[in-house]
Image (spheres, rainbow, N blue to C red):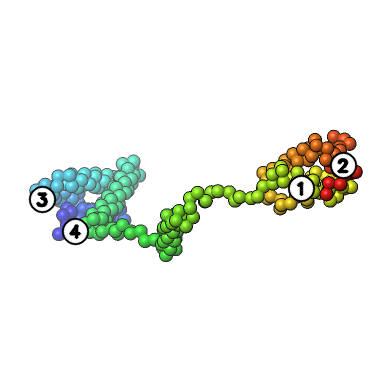
Amino acid sequence: MSEEPLLEVGAWQGPLNALLHAIRRNAVDLRTLPLTDLIEQFLACVEESLRRRPLEQTADDLVLAATLVQMRSTLLLRGDTTDHSAALSAAEQIQRVLLRKDALQRTVEVFERRAVLGEDVFGRGSVVFSPSVAETASLTLTRDLLDALLSVSRRRPQLMPEESIFLPSALPRLSVQDAIAWWQQKLCEHSESAWDLIEGVMSLSPTETPQSLTHRKAAWAVHLAAVLELAREGELLLTQLTCYEQLKIVNGKNSMNHC
């Protein structure tokens, strides 16, 4: 049963709030309500409400009732007076307050009925990470690769001795004595010829030209030392007309046959 104050004044029978709504919609003419009966009904409702309703709610109803009585008494005046216009404005203001009150009450009811997380409803559990097929395959391949590298590193000392892993390949090197003998043979075979030192090193070397720069420089140094030694002994001559001309090698003993 509704706890709103019920009024029976003139042709109206119903709650106080409904009466205010009806007056706002011009469904009920406030001037047709007996003022004395309206005041008596308000007093009876307030006395009854004090015993069975919260005090703050009764106070709100009392304020509404007092305002309604004031409006009713003001409307008894002529329509062209200031108080009559003020009563109409007050009625509209009361209607706005009531509408706002209803909206707030509906909002409170919605919040009270809403489901509470953890009591009425429960959230989803934490998502368990599930790697994709590609990620799983990648992790497997990486793990297998690391295991294979570790296995090879453990077996490598057995397959290849440690002292031979980082040793450079042994290439045959030309000694100065070998270069001297080689130049002496060329001088005997081609006594009338002249050679360029660089061409002799690159094309007349008894061994293949080394691939590394260090081996090439070593071969040139050996041939140059052999040529200088033979020139010191008089077996060949070194000629160079200008500073920028290449060094020429000729036989120094054309009249003698050493072959």
Q: Can you give x and y, in whole percent of width and height, for residue 91 in the image? A: 30, 48
The residue mark sitting in front, 3 or 2, is: 2
Identify the residue at horizontal 83%, vertical 40% (top origin).
Answer: 235
Q: Which residue is mark 2?
A: 253
The residue mark sitting in front, 1 or 2, is: 2
Q: Amino acid at mark 3?
A: Arg
Determine if residue 18 is in view. no
> How far apart are the alpha carbons under marks 2 and 4?
154 Å
Of the image marks 2 and 4, the number of the one nearer the N terminus = 4
> How far apart are the alpha carbons under marks 1 and 4?
141 Å
Q: Can you give x and y, in whole percent of width and height, for residue 248 in the image? A: 85, 41
> How far apart are the alpha carbons under marks 3 and 2?
148 Å
Residues at badges 1 and 2 in contact (C-beta under 8 Å)? no
Identify the residue at horizontal 18%, vertical 47% (top origin).
Answer: 57
Disc number for residue 182: 1
Q: Is residue 246 above or below residue 205?
A: above
Q: Amino acid at mark 4?
A: Gln
Q: Which residue is mark 3?
A: 52
Q: Amino acid at mark 2?
A: Lys
Of the image marks 1 and 4, the number of the one nearer the N terminus = 4
Mark 2 surroundings: few (<14), some (14-19) or many (≥20) residues within 10 A: some
Identify the residue at horizontal 47%, vertical 57% (top origin).
Answer: 159
Camera-side residue of 187 and 101? 187
